[in-house]
Image (cartoon, coloured by chain):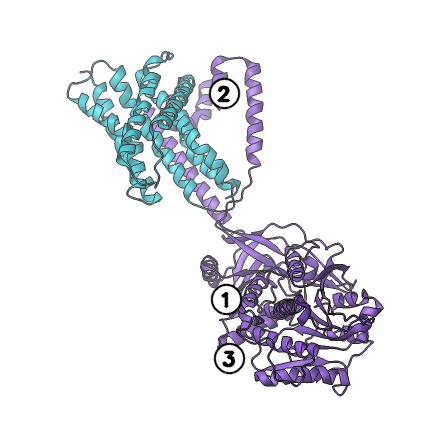
Chain colours: A purple, B cyan
């Protein structure tokens, strides 16, 4: 601007023109300034999008740019250009089902989750609210992941700003007009790129090997006991699927058992005559696909040397009853042995262990428990779990409700005591003897702070298998931890079976703008126009006189008169 | 929010200058050269003021109102007055009457002031989706500034260009000029130290500028009468 003035004062047409071009360039550059200012920016987490055998499920879109709306609605209103904000606390399932199952078009859906999903479990006291919230979240999750939704669905956590916004939106909706471009309101914008299919997602199995003591005359392979736990999760919001109980509790138990036995095995005098194989498998929610591939990678000798395998699944929120799930009939000698070793220790600790038998159907692709993959390869295996019935596909795999508060470290502690004690008695041949190897206050006691810190870490890390890269921090952390306790650690990277395919873009930032309506802009323009006209007339009248003003509007006729 | 709003706020901020120019006899006498020169002098003054501020002012740590710093700012604002003096007296203007000279100078001064203060924030801010009243208030402030600058130019021309003034009025003229010169400091004091809401502060500015304009008009016409 200064240049322009100087140009005009100094003369020189070429200088002027070059300055004009510079100014134009500056204006163009300035026009590209990112307009990112918004009243509120919120972290939001997208609903999972996946295909199962070619059938699409989940939310199929990512980008969002519509006005906000909330209950209570005017009846018969059109929501195809509105983002409906629903707090989970007051969820209206009939409305939701109607919209999702009938595939009616919405602009988008935003679920507001409470900050704390459930209050801390203290002993056996769970408030009624907890149970209700858990039920709502489970039902919501099952509804969403088994439907194909043609608009973006996001989850966000409630806080003061969003609650104030929601109240505002409700107030304006109650007057009967949902917000659109002409009536103002709030605009919700998520600018994320179109979600793309994950190309060749990998799942990683981590195994650790603790060799037993081979005697001088032993030429055969030592028998092996395997302890296995799946570490990955699946939930409606993959960026929130931390799976504290399913299966963070199992992972923590496995790590602590590895630590305890590595202490025992570090001294040759206390090294048992069994090898120990620890396996953290991935692909759990997808019919234990990773476990299958892991087992197939074993060579024949190792497979035959496995005495039995214990699979851990959700052992973090039980009180005094655990279940062993088996696929061979309970009368089988090996199964009986395992069951007895566990229930003997359990009785001493005041816990009951029930046994549940579920036959495997070879033609059924559904694998409900991890031990079934072992059984299909003729390895004796059991699953230890607090669940009494087999979970359905994609259920109990670490969903929205499964956060740090849903797992009790005391329960995990008890599980570790139980499993470690029964394993040790089997290894060292102390069955039936009343001896406590991992007694409290001994050097081999279960370490509660170890349990707690790993539970905390796992509860902060979403672990949906296909979204974890080969070098993901949590995989490296688990690998490092196992290598601290075991002698040989291997990572095995596999591709998920063709049945499942996933799409990326699991988290985004939501910008909330308060917009004024077009009517307001027009009104303002009108006011300003009349102000300027008034100012103009006022100035003309005061400086030149009223006649001049009138003459300005009457010029053409007077000229005509003059001419004639 | 949106280009529409930007356009609205722009015509609120810069429209009155254009209207003033076209409505009064200024346009008939083609005084655009004078206004342009006055704008250039304003730019120079602004640069000098910035340099002085940078040299003499300390950065306040807690953003509270520091009387000593504010006094310094007031003194630096007097550079404004010096600049106006320069524009009125030293520049060679075409042969235009006193009456029109101060109007042209004041208009050019106020226009440069508005552009330098408000154009950039308006461009960057008013085009976003988010709606605030901020830019409308800025436009109103620009209007008040225009009136203030015109009054200051009028009083300036009275002080420096008119030789025969009635004795009684001279101290009043100087007092009014002093008030006008310190008006920016007064408004910033009200905003920061007393914490007035933007609406209230803008209202005060508008009201005070109209009052001062009325006063200076009276003084000017009083001096017009043959002594």
Q: What's the distance in space between the residues labelled 2 and 3, CA to CA? A: 78 Å
Counting residues from the start of the chain, the first of labels 1 and 3 encountered is: 1
Please tell me how crowded label 1 is: few (under 14), some (14-19), or many (20+) other residues with Cα within 10 Å. Answer: few
Q: Which residue is rendered at x = 63% and y = 73% of the image?
A: A314
Identify the secondary structure beneath mark 2: helix
The chain letter for the residue carrying disc 2 is A
Asked if one can make out residue A98 in the rendered structure from this viewpoint, the answer is no
Find the residue positioned furthest to the left: B168
Asked if one can make out residue A433 in the rendered structure from this viewpoint, the answer is yes
- Label 2 sits on residue: A3
- Label 1 sits on residue: A116
Where residue B86 sits: x, y (%)?
33, 16
Counting residues from the start of the chain, the first of labels 2 and 3 encountered is: 2
- Label 3 sits on residue: A124
Q: Quadrant of residue A395?
A: bottom right
Q: Do the residues at discs 2 and 1 belong to one chain? A: yes
> Horizontally, is A254 left or right of B127 in the view?
right
């Amino acid at each position: 601007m200064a240049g322009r003035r100087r140009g005009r004062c100094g003369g020189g047409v070429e200088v002027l023109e070059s300055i004009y071009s510079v100014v134009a360039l500056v204006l163009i550059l300035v026009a590209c300034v990112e307009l990112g200012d918004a009243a509120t920016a919120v972290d939001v987490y997208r609903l999972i999008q996946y295909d199962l055998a070619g059938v699409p499920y989940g939310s199929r879109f990512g980008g969002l740019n519509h006005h906000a709306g909330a209950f209570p609605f005017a009846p018969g209103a059109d929501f195809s250009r509105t983002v409906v904000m629903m707090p989970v606390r007051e969820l209206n399932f009939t409305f939701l089902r109607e919209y999702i199952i009938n595939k009616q078009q919405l602009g988008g859906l935003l679920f507001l989750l409470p900050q704390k999903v459930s209050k801390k479990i203290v002993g056996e006291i769970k408030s009624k609210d907890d149970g209700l919230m858990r039920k709502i979240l489970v039902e919501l999750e099952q509804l969403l992941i088994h439907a194909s939704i043609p608009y973006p669905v996001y989850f966000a956590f409630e806080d003061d700003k969003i609650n104030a916004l929601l109240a505002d939106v409700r107030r304006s909706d109650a007057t009967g007009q949902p917000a659109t471009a002409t009536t103002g309101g709030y605009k919700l914008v998520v600018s994320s790129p179109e979600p793309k299919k994950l190309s060749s997602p990998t799942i990683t199995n981590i195994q650790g090997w603790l060799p037993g003591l081979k005697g001088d005359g032993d030429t055969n392979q030592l028998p092996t006991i395997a302890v296995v736990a799946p570490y990955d999760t699946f939930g409606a919001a993959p960026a929130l699927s931390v799976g504290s109980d399913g299966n963070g509790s199992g992972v923590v138990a496995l790590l602590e058992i590895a630590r305890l036995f590595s202490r025992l095995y570090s001294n040759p005098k206390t090294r048992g005559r069994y090898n120990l194989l620890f396996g953290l498998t991935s692909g759990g929610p997808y019919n234990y696909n990773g476990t299958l591939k892991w087992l197939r990678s074993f060579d024949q000798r190792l497979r035959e040397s496995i005495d039995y395998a214990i699979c851990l699944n959700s052992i973090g929120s039980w009180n005094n009853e655990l279940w062993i799930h088996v696929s061979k009939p309970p009368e089988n000698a090996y199964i009986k042995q395992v069951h007895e070793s566990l229930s003997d220790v359990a009785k001493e600790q005041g816990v009951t262990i029930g046994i549940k038998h579920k036959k495997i159907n070879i033609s059924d692709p559904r694998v409900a428990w991890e031990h079934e993959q072992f059984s299909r390869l003729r390895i004796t295996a059991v699953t230890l779990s607090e669940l009494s019935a087999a979970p359905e596909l994609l259920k109990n795999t670490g969903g929205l409700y499964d956060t740090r508060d849903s797992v009790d470290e005391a329960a995990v502690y008890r599980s570790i005591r139980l499993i470690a004690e029964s394993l040790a008695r089997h290894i060292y041949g102390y069955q039936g003897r009343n001896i406590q190897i991992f007694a409290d206050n001994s050097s081999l006691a279960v370490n509660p702070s170890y349990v707690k810190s790993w539970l905390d870490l796992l509860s902060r890390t979403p672990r949906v298998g296909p979204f974890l890269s080969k070098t993901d921090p949590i995989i490296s952390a688990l690998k490092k931890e196992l290598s601290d306790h075991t002698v040989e650690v291997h990572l095995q990277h596999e591709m998920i079976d063709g049945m499942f395919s996933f799409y990326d873009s699991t988290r985004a930032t939501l910008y909330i703008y308060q917009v004024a309506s077009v009517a307001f802009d027009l009104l303002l323009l009108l006011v300003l126009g009349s102000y300027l006209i008034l100012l103009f007339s006022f100035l003309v009248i005061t400086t030149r006189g009223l006649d001049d003003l009138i003459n300005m509007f009457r010029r053409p006729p007077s000229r005509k008169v003059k001419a004639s | 929010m949106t280009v529409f709003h930007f356009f609205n706020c722009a015509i609120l901020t810069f429209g009155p200058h254009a209207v003033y120019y076209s409505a009064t006899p200024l346009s008939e006498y083609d005084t655009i050269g004078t206004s342009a020169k006055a704008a250039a002098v304003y730019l120079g003054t602004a640069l000098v003021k910035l340099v002085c501020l940078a040299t003499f002012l300390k950065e306040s740590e807690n953003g509270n109102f520091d009387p000593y710093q504010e006094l310094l700012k007031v003194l630096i604002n007097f550079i404004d007055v010096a600049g106006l003096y320069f524009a009125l007296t030293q520049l060679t203007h075409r042969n235009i009457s006193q009456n029109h000279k101060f109007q042209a100078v004041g208009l050019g001064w106020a226009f440069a002031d508005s552009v330098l203060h408000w154009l950039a924030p308006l461009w960057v801010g008013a085009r976003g989706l988010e709606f605030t009243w901020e830019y409308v208030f800025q436009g109103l402030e620009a209007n008040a500034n225009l009136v203030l600058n015109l009054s200051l130019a009028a009083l300036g021309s009275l002080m420096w260009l008119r030789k025969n003034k009635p004795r009684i009025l001279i101290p009043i003229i100087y007092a009014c000029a002093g008030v006008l010169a310190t008006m920016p400091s007064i408004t910033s004091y009200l905003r920061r130290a007393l914490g007035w809401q933007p609406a209230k502060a803008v209202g005060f500015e508008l009201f005070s500028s109209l009052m001062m304009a009325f006063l200076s008009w009276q003084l000017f016409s009083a001096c017009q009468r043959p002594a």
